[in-house]
Image (cartoon, helix red, strand yellow):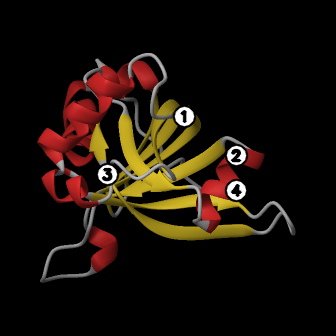
């Protein structure tokens, strides 16, 4: 069987960066703390000033509890278009570690302001005490550009 993974090139890097920077939401995969089973949810997504994935979540959510128990997570970005086979459209899976920034912590004010410029509707709840920002530090990634087009990537490939 032929290895479907191609050598990472500038076109693949550009596609991965575009998928991430244009994503307004992502599928977030975590491990449920009580069972260890995988759990997937949808989150609002932006990028921090360095280009890393960034979201705002509530302590009350199941995925927040899971991330606090185990910071290892996965994000999937890239939605199929209206036409064609969904598996033929590009998508990016990121393997990450969650880093939390809460109200009053160093850097929170700037991070919150940055997030709200990208996701202004979050202003409705961003000031609530149970909400905090999560930056996902990228460990590695898998880019699927369509059938027969796959690349393994590093954080440097995606962040530049």
Query: Are dots 4 and 2 in contact, CB under 8 Å?
Result: yes
Label 1 sits on a secondary structure element that is strand
Label 4 sits on a secondary structure element that is helix
The image quarter containing residue 71 is top right
Query: Are dots 1 and 2 in contact, CB under 8 Å?
Result: yes
Residue at which label 3 appears:
45
Query: How far apart are the alpha carbons under marks 1 and 4?
Result: 13 Å
Report the front residue among 156 and 48: 48
Residue 12 visible (yes or no):
no
Query: How far apart are the alpha carbons under marks 4 and 2?
Result: 5 Å
Residue 65 visible (yes or no):
yes
Label number found at residue 127 = none
Q: Measuring from the top left, give residue 100's x and y in whole percent.
A: 54, 34
Residue in view at x 28 percent, y 70 percent: 88
1 or 2: tag closer to the N-terminus:
2
3 or 2: tag closer to the N-terminus:
3
Q: Measuring from the top left, give residue 94's x and y in whole percent.
A: 48, 44
């Amino acid at each position: 069987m032929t290895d479907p993974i191609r050598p990472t090139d500038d076109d693949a890097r550009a596609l991965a960066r575009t998928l991430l920077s244009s994503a307004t939401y992502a599928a977030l995969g975590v491990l449920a703390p009580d069972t260890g089973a995988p759990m997937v949810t949808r989150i609002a997504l932006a990028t921090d000033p360095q280009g890393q994935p960034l979201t705002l979540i509530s302590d009350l959510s199941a995925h927040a509890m899971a991330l606090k128990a185990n910071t290892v997570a996965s994000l999937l970005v890239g939605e199929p278009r209206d036409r064609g086979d969904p598996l033929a459209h590009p998508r990016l899976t990121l393997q990450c570690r969650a880093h939390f920034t809460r109200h009053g912590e160093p850097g929170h004010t700037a991070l919150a302001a940055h997030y709200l410029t990208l996701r202004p509707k979050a202003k409705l709840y961003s000031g609530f005490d149970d909400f905090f920002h999560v930056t996902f530090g990228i460990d590695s990634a898998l880019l699927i550009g369509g059938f027969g087009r796959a690349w393994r990537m590093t954080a440097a490939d995606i962040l530049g």
